[in-house]
Image (tube, rainbow, N blue to C red):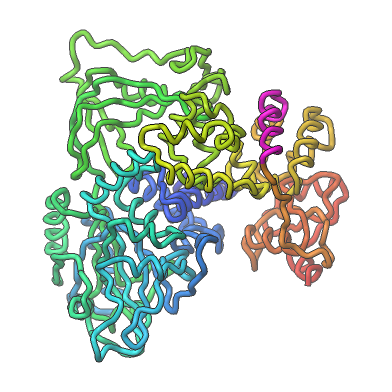
Amino acid sequence: MQSLFNLDFEDAKAKHKKLVAEIAAHDKRYHDEDAPTISDAAYDTLRRDLEALEQEFPELVSADSPTQKIGATPSKGFSKVTHAQPMLSLGNAFSREDVTDFVERVQRFLNTDKPIEMIAEQKIDGLSCSLRYEKGVLVQAATRGDGTVGENITANIKTIADIPHTLPKGVPDIIEVRGEVYMTKADFEALNKKQEEAGDKVFANPRNAAAGSLRQLDASITASRPLHFFGYALGEMSAPIAQTQEGIRQALEQYGFKVPKPSALTTDVDALIAYYEDIGQKRATLSYDIDGIVYKVNDLALQVRLGQVARAPRWATAHKFAAEKAVTVVEAIEIQVGRTGALTPVAHLTPVNVGGVMVSRATLHNQDEIERKDIRQRDTVTIQRAGDVIPQVVEVDLKKRPSNSKPYVFPDVCPECGSEAIREEGEAVTRCVGGLICPAQAVERLKHFVSKSAFDIEGMGDKVVRQFYEDGWIKNPADIFTLKDNYAEELKEKEGWGELSVVNLFEAIEKKRQIGLDRFIYALGIRQVGQATAKRLAITYTSLINMITALQKAQDHDSPAYAELLNIEDIGPAVAEELIAFFHEAHNREVVQQLQTQLTIEDFINDIRDDTAVAGKIVVFTGTLETLSRSEAKAQAERLGAKVAGSVSAKTDYVVAGQDAGSKLKKAKELGVTILLEEEWKALIS
């Protein structure tokens, strides 16, 4: 039977897997790295597609689906806090019809046709956290994390002036205040200016700035950042302080917390929509960012009756604002070259205010996007700032196009180094073939090398990396570790550098002379090799010398080494070729050798057992398991010492077959590989 998506079950499974992976990656960038790469609207579209797919194919729902989770896994840099009550996410409404449906669902669940009093509040675009008070004293603060477990940020929270360290007498012995840490628009602009002048990371928007500031391992950095807090809800309570959501707001104000104003109480959908539209019109004039309105059942007893479904409460929903738009002119189209050689067109715009932010650039993505929308220099365009990522061009006003306008011709040479720029068949991206002789790629690769998820060298922001490169001090990553020997005195004489800042930089570099294998692999900036792939490579090869040796042997596609490479989960022929080509290039091998003389690259030690029935065995999972998600099964097998592969070969020891197993099961039978049903697998590992 065909679905609403016009997919059969196998195609639906493939689409589901792709959506889960894509959303998980965006969740990590948003929650963990504080650096989203798509708009809220685009993200919401992905979520709606996944939810609709799972409604039609409920058998696809698994524990690792984003619809069953909240937020992201807590960072390893903080201790963990298990929330006494989960910090739920919210369902979304995007239209009047959605709001009406929400209210009617509440009435149906409560089996009543009487009007339900709702409270409407501003949805603050910040970082959610929970503050725990015991006997009136702030004892613990935690981020939302994945909704169940968050990060302990107590020391950082105590630096925020808006948050009282003690509550008035008479409060319950235990009270958890939940709310949002945010940064005002003015403070955000001042912070970014300061960051840019220091050559440090600049933030995309106030939400990212607030999250990045709050999640610092050094609380003194948080203390230096202008953060604020709005309270709006409660977690665990030893005794009630109110009977309604409005009562909670009033109590929090009495305790010394700020609450977002105004709010609205009503039993009428028209009044809810009127509040939404009124706040939407005032949005640009607010001193802080909001991204929608939250509607909640006001009566707390009814909230308890309504409960929750999956990751969201039944008694609340978020009505998101539409993407903010404005009209301006494309003054020029510039090509930027990234670290992998990708040529990205960017429109330089006549500056225009969009939602309280002055916008002067918009991404044009690639050649296809320019041609599809027929974007030209001097065109009058509508731009959209959704989710505070880099704005996008929505459409061109053809009536205002100049009479002498000509189509934009995408370059076939790199604007940075003059090398040929080619677009391979089947790809949307045009790339410079200049490699490391291209200064743009060299600088971007160096930026990547010192970035947070790679070597994370404090003080080496984008501006500093570019300055050192242009001065000829660092041409490849190994040069970073000889800066002190070669240029210490010259650096002290540079404008903006004093003796203390020089000392701090060199101390930061020295701290990074020891690094784990997976981070080292990621830092090399090999195309298509992200953090997850780098870790899988580290798990497989355990040491750098093992990996290099194996990749050299894998140049022969008929070799066992090449087969082993392809057997690593999520590494297909394209990624394999990128890895082989990188280590085949003499210049890259030379850089790695130079780094080896400067660094201690730790072998990867996996926390796995070697005393189980499956230790050292190669296992492939196929089909749908009944009691475990595929991710849980793989993680369990790896903890027990097994190596989980993505495809079946003669070296495979076991194929664990769930329902609807397909080609992998067939191949296992052809090769005579031992096939286990789920119950047999569970018996084996027990």
Q: Is residue 610 above or below residue 291?
A: below
Is 371 situated left or right of 245 in this image?
Answer: right
Picture quadrant of residue 533: top right
Give the residue at the far right of this rendering. 672
* Residue 591 is covered by the magenta coloring: yes
Q: Is residue 63 above or below residue 33?
A: below
- The answer to whether residue 85 is seen in the rendering is yes
- The answer to whether residue 527 is seen in the rendering is no
Q: Say which quadrant the C terminus sits in.
A: bottom right
Q: Going 20% across and 72% down the picture, which residue do you hit? A: 118
Is 35 situated left or right of 297 in this image?
Answer: right
Q: Is residue 134 above or below residue 9?
A: below
Q: Going 66% across and 36% down the picture, which residue do you hit? A: 595
Rendering coords of residue 21 (x, y %): 53, 49
Q: Going 78% across and 58% down the picture, which residue do you hit? A: 642
Please name the predominant secondary structure of the magenta segment in the image. Answer: helix
Rendering coords of residue 458 (x, y %): 48, 47
* Residue 94 is covered by the magenta coloring: no
Is 545 situated left or right of 40 in this image?
Answer: right
Query: In this picture, which residue range is highlighted in magenta?
Result: 581-598
Nearer to me, 355 or 416? 416
